[in-house]
Image (tube, coloured by chain):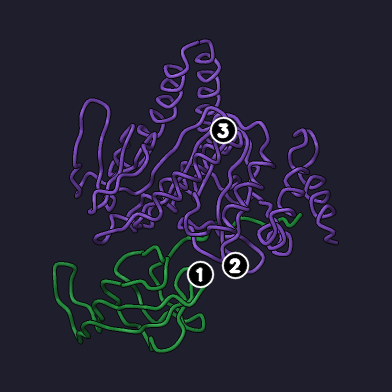
Amino acid sequence: MPESPLSFRTRSPELRKGGTVVGVTDRIYDVSGSTVIFEEVLLRGDLSGELEYNGTRLRVIKVDTAIGMLVDQRGPRGPVWKGVTCAILGI
Amino acid sequence: MSKTREWFRSYSSLLKARFSASGLIEHRVTKGSSREAQILDVLSALLPLRISVLRDGVIIDSSDTESPKFDALLVDRQFWPLLMQQDTVAVAMLESVLVAVEIKSSLGSKDLTDIINKSSFLRTMRCAGRGAAVCPPVVVAFAYECPNLPLAFFDFAVNFRLNPTKSPSLVCTLNSGLLFLAHVDGTALVPTDVPTAGLVPAIAGAGEDSLLIFLYFLSRMAALGSDTVDTMLSYSTPVFAATRVHHFDDEFLNAVARDEGARLRARECFKRAQSTPFEQLYGDARSSLKLS
């Protein structure tokens, strides 16, 4: 009977592309269904193409707002995308 | 052994002792209520305070569709109102529920079917807006005993393969093991809370550490996006690092999902007395389907 180790891998708000962090979500999202909407993504690199988020493959299909520099009660940061809709490609 | 592990084993022993003591109550409903209260008291004491443990909860959605009654609902009361509370019964908005919990004295086939049916109903209710966590919420179950854990796992795994998005996410049997869903990450399985097609149903024979792992899973499901719960993993590394799990291979699951006759033949193999090793039951089930 197949036996495997259990990995309680720490979940992360990081979006990765080819292993490199290209974005950070404002909180950790549970990803299920056909799409997920991230309220905010802090850009660290190129978010085009296939991305990986806590073991799930995603692709950005829509961005509501792109902001160069955002200043609010959480401090200054940018560039930031708001309302990022991603298609869930699979696990 | 870490103190955390010892404490949870003590909780497990206490629950087991109280379960036995409540067995002397002849009135079935009173006995059941007592047993529900025992585990819910532990959860209420230990889960993060942001989570309210509502006993005997009913969930409705915006179209007034009403769920079956669950033994407990884990609800975000910090930002979400209830719709009704009278004595011990509460009605919660679908979107406010983090986890729906069922509690069983014994996890027999009929009990697991009841859990699966309730989960199936809840997981198809319609969300009007964004939920506190995942919407529709996930369903978990806790049982004090299980007369045949291999058979329970077979039924859980087959049901998941047939109806993945409607499946319960986690079933814990005290001092025995956990049935849950995971995705494959290299050679390891990573537990996943939300039932989704493509996941692997798995069983962990965690024994006396089942309650500790159950509480971790519940805390994680209700963590509202925070990763602070993962710090808990450091508090009993031997448990979380050393747990190994078993699962059925795809060939077997496809065979039993595709054909009811095959499913019944395989199931017969798991009905045998629990003293037979799981691997042997599985081997016999594969042989009954003429799989190598």
Rendering colour (chain A)? green
Same chain for labels 3 and 2? Say yes or no. Answer: yes
Earlier sequence position, callout 3 versus callout 2: 3
Residue A2's x, y, as percent?
Answer: 74, 57
Quick one: label 3, few (<14), some, or many (20+) residues within 10 Å? Answer: many
Residues at discs 1 and 2 in contact (Cβ within 8 Å): yes
Same chain for labels 1 and 2? Say yes or no. Answer: no
Q: Give the secondary structure at mark 2.
A: strand
Q: Which residue is mark 3?
A: B174
Is residue A16 found left or right of A25 in the rendered image? right
Amino acid type at mark 2: Asp
Q: CA distance from mark 3 to mark 1?
A: 30 Å
Quick one: label 2, few (<14), some, or many (20+) residues within 10 Å? Answer: few
Height in image: B77 above or below A14? above
Rendering colour (chain B)? purple
Quick one: label 1, few (<14), some, or many (20+) residues within 10 Å? Answer: some
Residue lying furthest front: B261
Mark 3 belongs to chain: B
Q: CA distance from mark 1 to mark 2?
A: 7 Å
Residue B133's x, y, as percent?
Answer: 33, 56
Q: Give the secondary structure at mark 1.
A: loop
Is residue A13 found left or right of B115 in the rendered image? left
Q: CA distance from mark 3 to mark 2?
A: 28 Å
Query: Quarter of the image containing the N terminus of chain A?
Result: bottom right
Q: Nearer the viewer, residue B100 or A19?
A: B100
Mark 1 belongs to chain: A
Residue depicted at x 38% and y 86%:
A47
Q: Which residue is mark 1?
A: A55
Q: Nearer the viewer, residue B128 or A22?
A: B128
Q: Which mark is on residue B185? A: 2
Residue B210's x, y, as percent?
Answer: 57, 39
Q: Give the secondary structure at mark 3.
A: loop
